[in-house]
Image (tube, rainbow, N blue to C red):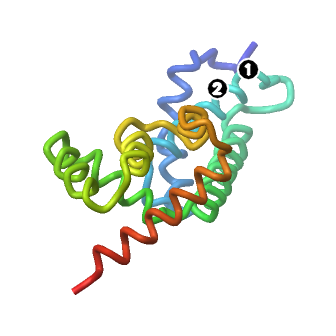
């Protein structure tokens, strides 16, 4: 017996949606609503599976479960934001990807007089094709560390050339 009134999980979830919203307001969650709401729903599902009706009503149990799930999600989100800081490489990658093929051709044409064919290939493979450092290093027959150092020096040189008056 789940409870004295034998609700289905879907009915209980619908009944608890306002509780999820209230917890989100109390915890000042104002972005990524669906992500947090879904975490709370999954927690309710797990609580529903573990719940023992002999120990009391489900709603107080769900109250603590929702709060705990939202706090856990907040911690994970904060940890991610703390560790992930967009770099110039990320911004360049997004710009290239976002502006399509014409922008890519212009990018390669711009690089041609400033880079060797190998350097142009490295940038193209990384920013356009989406290969990671390990894959590009294997293509070129060098270590990952050597590739990263080469790419870093190349980007530094290109930044200096682009900022010339």
The crowding category of the residue bearing disc 1, from other C-alpha atoms within 10 Å (few below 14, some 14 to 19, many at least 20), is few
Which residue ends up furthest to the right in the rendered image?
55
Quadrant where the image shows the C terminus: bottom left
Q: For this view, does 133 lie left or right of residue 116?
A: right
Q: Secondary structure at mark 2?
A: helix
Residue nearer the viewer, 60 or 68: 68
The residue that appears at 49% across and 39% down in the rendered structure is 17
Residue 128 relative to residue 68: left or right: left
User: At which x and y percent is residue 126?
Assistant: 44, 44
The residue drawn where x is 64% and y is 26% is 45
**Residue plotted at (44% across, 59% down):** 89
Q: Is residue 144 above or below residue 41?
A: below
Q: Quadrant of the N terminus?
A: top right
- Residue 92 drawn above or below residue 45: below
Whether the residues at callouts 1 and 2 have beta carbons within 8 Å, the answer is yes
Residue 77, horizontal then vertical, whole percent: 59, 55
**Nearest the camera: 4 or 147?**
147
Q: Is residue 61 or residue 25 the one in the foreground?
A: 25
Height in image: 135 above or below 11? below
Residue neighbourhood size for the residue with mark 2, other residues' Cα within 10 Å, grouped as few (<14), some (14–19), many (≥20): some
Q: Which mark is residue 49?
A: 1
Query: Measured from the top left, where is residue 15 in percent x and y?
Result: 50, 33
Q: CA distance from mark 1 to mark 2?
A: 6 Å
Give the camera-side residue of 119 and 99. Answer: 119
Report the disc number at residue 45.
2
Choose top left, top right, bottom left or bottom right for residue 158: bottom left
List x then y, in percent, for residue 79.
66, 59
The residue depicted at 52 percent of the width and 55 percent of the height is: 24
| SS label for mark 1 | helix
Q: Quadrant of residue 3?
A: top right
Q: Is residue 143 above or below residue 146?
A: above
């Amino acid at each position: 017996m789940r409870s004295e009134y034998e609700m289905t999980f879907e009915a209980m979830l619908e009944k608890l949606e306002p509780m999820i919203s209230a917890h989100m307001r109390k915890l000042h969650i104002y972005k990524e609503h669906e992500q947090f709401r879904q975490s709370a729903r999954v927690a309710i599902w797990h609580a529903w599976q573990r719940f023992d009706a002999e120990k009391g009503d489900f709603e107080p149990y769900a109250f603590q479960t929702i709060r705990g799930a939202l706090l856990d999600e907040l911690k994970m989100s904060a940890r991610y934001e703390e560790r992930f800081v967009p770099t110039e490489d990320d911004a360049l990658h997004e710009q290239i990807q976002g502006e399509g093929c014409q922008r890519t051709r212009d990018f390669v044409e711009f690089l041609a007089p400033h880079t060797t064919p190998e350097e142009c290939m490295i940038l193209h493979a990384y920013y356009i094709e989406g290969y990671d450092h390990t894959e590009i290093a294997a293509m070129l027959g060098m270590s990952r560390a050597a590739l990263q150092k080469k790419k870093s020096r190349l980007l530094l040189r290109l930044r200096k050339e682009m900022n010339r008056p």
